[in-house]
Image (spheres, rainbow, N blue to C red):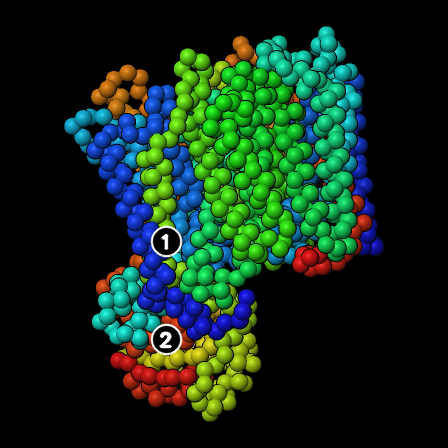
Amino acid sequence: MERLTYAQIDDAVLGAMAPARRRYVVIMLVLGGLVAMFFTLWIHQARTGMGVAGINSPVGWGVYIASFVFWVGIAHSGTLISAILHLVRAKWRTAVARSAEAMTIFAVMTAGLFPLIHLGRVGVFYYILPYPTTRQIYPNFLSPLVWDVVAISTYFTVSLVFWYVGLLPDLASARDRWHRLVGPHHPRTRFYHALAMGWSGSGNQWRHHGRAYLFFAALATPLVISVHSVVSWDFAMSILPGWHTTMFPPYFVAGAIHSGLAMVIVLLLPMRKLLRLESLVTDWHFDCLAKTLLVTTCIMGYSYIIEPFTAWYSGNVIERQFIHWRAFGDTWLTPGYWSMWLLNVIVPLAFFVPRLRRSPTALMLISLGITIGMWLERGVIVPASLAHDFMPHAWGQYVPRPIEWGILLGSFGWFFFWFFGFAKFLPTIAANEVKEETHRDGLPAPRDAGVSPALCAPCDWLLENAKSSSTSDAGKMPARHEDETPASRYVWGTFDTPAALIAAVRQLRDDGVTGMETYTPFRLQEVEKLLGRGPSPVRLWTLAGALAGAAGGFALAIGLAAINGLVVGGRISYAVIVPYCVIAFEGTILLGVLANVTGLFFHGRLGSARPLPRGYVRRISEDRFGLLIPCDREQVGAMRERLSTLCAEAIHVVE
Amino acid sequence: MSSNEPHRAQTIALALLATVGVAAWVVMYWLGDRARLWQSLLVAFVYFSPLAGGLVVWSAVVNLSNGRWTGTMEKAALWGLGGWAVAIALFVLLAALFVPSWASRCENPTWACWQSDRRADAGKDFWLSSEFLFARNAAALLAFWAVAAWYVRRRMRGLPARGLATGVVLLYVLSMTLIGYDLVMSLDPVWFSSLLAPYVFISGMYTATAAWAIVAADSGLLEPTDRRHDLGKLIVTFSLLTMYMMYGQLLCIWYGNLPPELRFVVPRLRHPPMQYVSLLLLGTVYLGPLVLMLPRWVKRRPAPLRLMAVWVLVFMYVERWWLIVPTFHQGHDVISLPIDLHAGDAAVALAAVAGTALGIRHVRRAGPDHDVAEKGGAT
């Protein structure tokens, strides 16, 4: 990657949020048209009735449910890239994770519409929620459809929180940038000010943020796997041939990641071009994405072989005839079945050729092919089993009607509309992570012109000796203890490089100065170590939330089963532990994440009404490194002098 | 005392243990229930083959993903090649002793002759003929170990081996899938689950991860602390993944409630005494590592990490026994399965553990002392 300074990284990321050009406006108008078509068709269907769609008896699930599964699948890659790659510390994650996370949110928003569309009577969707009702019928947590509602809503909530927490530092950058460019009262400045929740980049905030983000990733990773497993159980829990197979959970998860990765490429290629992000999203990132696609391609190929092989191996005549019909029958599903082999497995193997992994044309064509192929896979799985079950007299056919295709097309418009809107209003790349990566790679940001040579002269010596602890008494500050009366003054020192800040903190710590706080545009773990801060208590919040969620999940499922048993009668399944584990697991993740974010906001002192520290320098969120030192009135002069010898670029005092 | 003497003493001790294990098994086989002792071989093979192969696969995965977190520890994974001899020896014994072992129980000792209920054999007699079954598994195993040996040889010389690493991973998946279908699932030809074969290789990787921790610890490669922490997290991850693969199929079978599928699950999970073994496994290999390794210090300190690795390896052996041996007592009218333990299981385990350790030491000594991760990692 081209070596960029911290300010250039901000320029590239935040510059993409500049007022829209004509090409962008045209794209948004086209997408807006598709969205209008989507809702018009949906309203038409709701008014006319489900008869306008092609679903029938016995094929009651068609394009809508297939599209639901497809969009949930698309949603998965965002969390995969962001959470799993964060856990395994993959460097290529930083440039693509934010867009992928956004893709997750918008894909879940799209997916969530399809069960409502399929429902016909949209107004009764709330029947599935567990609330006290005069109907006296509560959701049955033995049903995979109820698991689905719980899993998808958990996934949406967790993805949204994960995305937002990751965005916080970059929203602060946007707030400060617009504050400098258009003033504090401009609507855009106010918008980012509200969203940034008072993020100042203090060492304390970064410490809790780093811990919270890690736990988000650790909780989101099993969630990704669970959610698409739950979606697969909508089918696998039935006993229909083609649906009832134990391998569906990992098969669906792999398929979801496969389609999601392809969609990331489909989105990133034009976004990089439109927003001029070539310096941050490079060919190397696409190479890594394509290699990951190769892994999922192999898993898909494996699953495609295992499924028919097990059907044959089972010796079950129904399973065997179904697989044969799907592959060689007289239905439109047959070409769909072979197309999914071609588009999802055979063509993507081309990525074994290194040149194709870096060719935008090849990347786009193969990824579009996978996107189509993965929709076809869902399109084959969902209606096929219903159309061809055990009894020949019950066999049927399903041909989607134009309204179903129209709504499917409109859903793409809805999804892209949100995504391109996001690209213009929010940072599409995690600038703070790119800066941290730059810092870790040892690429110092060049000093800006205008720094006083007199100030820099002693600093060169200081930076060279940054790792050694000074024991010299010269310039030592009188120690200030925590139990003394509150400081009456705060001295701000601003530094132009992280190394200078680290060196200053080391020196002042050795001088016995206490109560220092740093303010940085990205997480500086060296400073946390120097200041001897322990692990963030956010982990305890997370653990408590997770345990409460597990207990709450079991309590909800068992409690409602008991009430249903009492009200409806019949056999009461108080403690059917096996399926209730699903609800308990989702509860664990949901409350764990909510407790995590609460802990972050509480300990990180975040909140929209909270003001920034007095004297806060707006460039800190971009490329400057602040040090705030509390001291008494009579120490201010000495402290200023000391900071000037420690290479501070600017020094000011606030009360 | 020269520096080689402790090493030589350990080698002699391991060789003695292996000899004792082999001798005990041979005596029991000569005098006792041959069919049951053949089952001991099967349990050991299904345990040690994915374990040893999985070690080499870890190296391949690290190499393919440009993983840097392992550092010099990757060497310990390469030494897993030393397990090939035990894996192949167990397989050869399984094939060679199949007919003599089952001759006393079956009139015609063919595959799955121990099952009275063979309704589902229709159309797959050829697939389940013992000759073809052993032949295809032998081919897959030989292919895997040959490519693994080639890969390890190149890696130890610091030569590029990414293509071979891909081959190692793919052949491991293929061979372990075959083992899952042929040597575990088809023990009861009526029962089937499409997730069992993936379960076998994922759980094999789980045991390989635990073994990796032990081999690395013995060689002083588990430093610094962060490396231990990462390996600890990997063990927890694979315990969760293994649990997911098991839960995924159990839930589906539980919900479907279909007799051909339930015959595996119900006797193991619903009825004592096998139910107690299942609960033991839930607490030890599935949920155990998640709970016990939750504190950071367990993952970051050498002794607790090593203890957890041994814990996983021991109870995964029980899991393999749970997967295989009760099937020989299974039938459409059997509800409660006995806990059929045999001294032969311990004898084979002893011999195989000592043999694998000897093999790993041999590869370690034969290999160069340089850091393979540094020399070949960037290729």
Q: Is residue B84 left or right of residue A317?
A: right
Q: Position of residue A573 (x, y in %)?
A: 33, 22
Kindly indicate whether the residues beneath marks 2 and 1 are on one polypeptide chain: yes
Q: Position of residue A346 (x, y in %)?
A: 59, 40
Give SS at disc 1: helix
- Quick check: A627 above or below A230? below
Quarter of the rendering containing residue A167: bottom left
2 and 1 marks in contact (CB < 8 Å): no
Q: Is residue A137 left or right of residue A282?
A: left
**Mark 1 belongs to which subunit?**
A
Q: Residue furthest top?
A: B107
Label 2 to label 1, Cα distance in Å? 29 Å
Disc on the earlier residue, 2 or 1: 1
- Quick check: B219 above or below A624? above
For label 1, count other residues whose C-alpha is less than 10 Å away and answer few (under 14), some (14-19) or many (20+).
Answer: many
Residue A469's label in the rendered image is: none
Q: Where does label 1 land, which residue?
A: A419
Quarter of the rendering containing residue A48: top left
Q: Where does label 2 land, which residue?
A: A619
Question: Looking at the image, which residue is at 49% across and 69% down?
Answer: A526
